[in-house]
Amino acid sequence: MSDDTRLDQHPGADPWAPAPPAPRVPDYVQRPDPGLEAYAGEFLDGLDSIPTYRPTVGCIIPAYNEAETIAGVLDSLLQQTRLPDVIHLVVNNTTDESVEIASHYAGPHTRMTPSGEQHTVIYVHDIGKNPEKKVGALNYGYSLVEHMDYLLGVDGDTTPEPDAIEHLVNEIASDDRIGGISAVYSIDDSALDSWWEKFLIAGQRAQFSAFNMQNLLKGRNMAVLGGQFSIFSTQALRDVMRDSHQRTPWVSDSEVEDSLLSLQIKSAGYLTKISARARAHVGGMTTLRSLDAQQVKWNFGAIDLMWPGQRGDTRGQPFHPNLRLRWFEHMSMVQNMTTRFLFMVLLAWSLMFDAFVFSPLWLIPPLAAVWLNVRVAHSMAFRNKRDYLFALLVVPAEAYMFTRMGHFVRAWYKFFSRQQTDNWAAQAKAERGKGIAWIYPFVIALVIYALLLAGWQLGPLDAAAKSDILYVGWRVLGVLTVLQTAWMIIKASKRYRGYKA
């Protein structure tokens, strides 16, 4: 067959036969109307130009004496890639210039963002003396935005990353089962002066990072939607009020109003999550007094929610899913206190009895702790050299652990002694540099330690009894330490799956 054989013919057909005529279109088949095609194009272009539904977001900022930080908070909100539709600053019980500073921001604001021009309005409310403090300010703000889709709660000292609101809105709008989402919190340590402040903030950064990563790795389920920077579905808040027979979403029954609301949202059938991408920088505590007051308030409130039975108007829910991590944290703290105090006592007794024998195996637990702390530091999105030094030098991390033990003991003592203390007022007092309650646990621990040493040296025990006590004591400590070290190694070996705390 020649090269010019027709390629559109069937095999075996005559290659020189003429091509068949084109099929004839019947008259009843309508040909495309050019005018209709043009209209269809215009119609589709019109559909594309119709804006999609944009959820509404009302931002609430409860503020108490935030003159030093409120301008930075409002600036960070106005620089967001997704502006809130409205921002209500609710100033309460203030004695500083918070209202005057915030008043310069009041009014409408317009900003060009990557998604187009956006608008928001800032309102400044000074509600004066408010007996319910932050809870009252939050509920006042809720009454102003309850008609919107979402409520964004922001503390008066929290500055979010520029894309934080955009991520929160996208995440909560993607799943109707979500009742609230918390941002990933860190503490900005760039403007610290003394080494003491740097030490305390480094400890708080490590504490926040470890807590965040625990929640991220547990399906991003968040036990506490912290009031620092969290977004809530207003429908979920309405369901909480209905199910709990409350007139407002937040109630003053608990020392930790955000923990209680998180439990109620979970009980109403919603999910409580931590964001994978939204980040915010919260205010840290730069003195032992203020840190103690904050941590005691948090621990006391958590104990109040964890403890079985009825205490005041708060029903203990020990088996609530959101409290499992809290129980684990408290049991871990008890173990940390036991192993450290027992080691210090046994070491002193052994030295006094001339029975001290060093073993290289003792280096394994601190090395495991350093490995875990380094991994925690490396998981931070905004890590720096101070975070690594805090983990590698051992002493800073241990010193911070001892301060946390003091907070833990004080919180449980206050709970069991049924002290009627306003922990919000105590924290405010501590932040003003007043109060010495933070030192009590350490003084008591030193007194007990001194009595144990004196009793060992001057007591009636003979050499055989002392030898038996040391024999049993070191072996009990060994078992506890092995279990604790194994758990640290397991935690340090976990994959973080790309998450950053």
Image: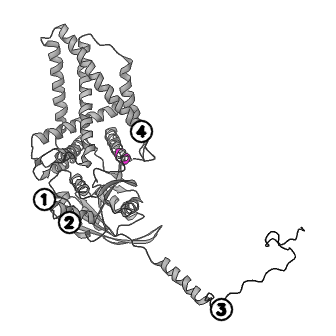
Q: Position of residue 213 (x, y in %)?
A: 37, 45
Q: Which residue is mark 2?
A: 140
What's the amino acid at mark 2? Tyr
Q: Quadrant of residue 330?
A: top left
Q: Are marks 3 and 4 in contact (CB under 8 Å)?
A: no
Q: Which stretch did the figure color magenta?
A: 214-224
- Closest to the observer, 188 or 22: 22
Identify the secondary structure beneath mark 4.
Answer: loop
Residue 450 makes an appearance in the image: yes
Residue 376 image point, x, y percent: 39, 40
Does residue 304 sit above or below 389 in this rendering? below
The location of residue 176, given as percent across then percent down, is 34, 63
The first of marks 3 and 1 along the sequence is 3
Identify the residue under disc 1: 131
For the residues carrying marks 3 and 4, which lies nearer the camera in this image? 3
Element at badge 3?
loop
Query: Regarding mark 2 in the picture, which secondary structure is present there?
Result: helix
Of marks 1 and 2, which one's residue comes earlier in the chain? 1
Q: Looking at numbered disc 1 in the image, what kind of residue is underneath it?
A: Pro
**SS for dot 1:** loop
In-image side of 305 versus 234 (left or right):
left
Q: CA distance from mark 4 to mark 2?
A: 43 Å
Mark 2 or mark 3: name the one nearer the start of the chain: 3
- According to the picture, the residue beneath numbered tag 4 turns out to be 494
Residue under label 3: 27
Work out whether residue 390 can be spotted: no
Dot 4 or dot 1, earlier in sequence: 1
For badge 4, the amino acid type reads: Lys
Q: Residues within 10 Å of mark 3 (few under 14, many from 20)?
A: few
**Contact, CB < 8 Å: mark 1 with mark 2?**
no
